[in-house]
Image (cartoon, rainbow, N blue to C red):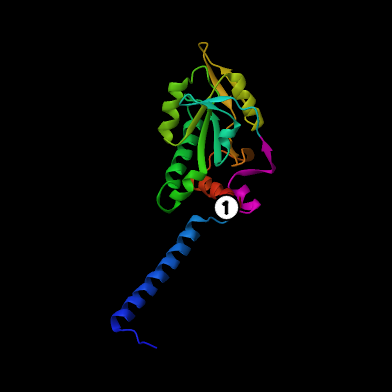
Amino acid sequence: MTELSPKSKIRLTIASCLAFVAVVLVLFLNNVLTADVLSDDQLRDHGVILLSAPREISNVALVTHEGDAFTQAGFEGRWSYVFFGFTICPDICPRTMGIMGRMDEMLRDGTRRRLAEKFRGVFVTVDPERDNQERLNRYVTGFSRYFLGLRESKENIAAFAGQVNAAFGKVPTMGGGYMIDHTSNIAVINPDGRLHAFIKPERTPEELLRVLESFAASA
């Protein structure tokens, strides 16, 4: 058997070291990118109401903030976290959208970036009279350029909202104006286009991200 030269031994040692480092790096990244699945108790602690069985969604007829038609098929292929609100909402809407926007930033930063395509934030206006396409576009993309805004007639919005347990209605104000009273939960729609869960309001971006990572890991 031919004995390796010193240079060959060095090359073999270096190659072996590089292979070992590559394996360790792959295992590390896999560990970072693969979140543990939260238990039912842990999900409740994170403000999650999990449906016993995902609920079918149908007959969605809305329009995106870019003017494109949107049906229930648009939810398929990724996890959508959906919030119903209106652009001049003074409190819960900007807070919740800010949390969703911050979570989106975290999702696209560093080692989590590969997971970003699995999730999408969605804002559905419950005030289509005032939230035209231009205003909706500015509002939604102000929190994340990756977010999707949806609008249409009050009837079409209500038809979709009813399927995901989101309620809304006008509240008259002095001077003949109005505000909108609306549900503040975030609805989670799974990649099959079915309602999967609700997340209670006032969660942190870290909590929201942890919940969505858990859902993706359990799929």
Could you tell whether 187 is left or right of 94 in the image? right
Q: Quadrant of the N terminus?
A: bottom left
Looking at the image, the residue that sits furthest to the top is 176
Quadrant position of residue 74:
top right
Seen from the viewer's position, the closer of residues 191 and 108 is 191
Mark 1 lies on a secondary structure that is helix
Q: How many other residues sit within 10 Å of disc 1, few (<14), some (14-19) or many (≥20)? A: some
The correct choice, above or below, for 15 with respect to 35 in the image is: below
Image point 50% across, 37% down: which residue? 121
Foreground pick, 75 / 101:
75
Toward the viewer: 7 or 129?
Answer: 7
Q: Residue furthest front?
A: 1
Would you say residue 169 sits in the magenta stretch? no
In the rendered image, residue 51 lying in the magenta stretch gets the answer: yes
Q: Position of residue 113 (x, y in %)?
A: 43, 49
Please report the residue visible at 45 percent of the width from the left and 51 percent of the height from the top: 112
Q: Position of residue 210 (x, y in %)?
A: 53, 50
- Figure label count: 1
Which residue position is annotated with label 1?
217
Q: Residue at x 40, y 48 (%)?
A: 109
Image coordinates for residue 186, horizontal then vertical, percent: 57, 37
Magenta stretch bounds: 37-56
Is residue 204 visible from the viewing direction of this image?
A: no
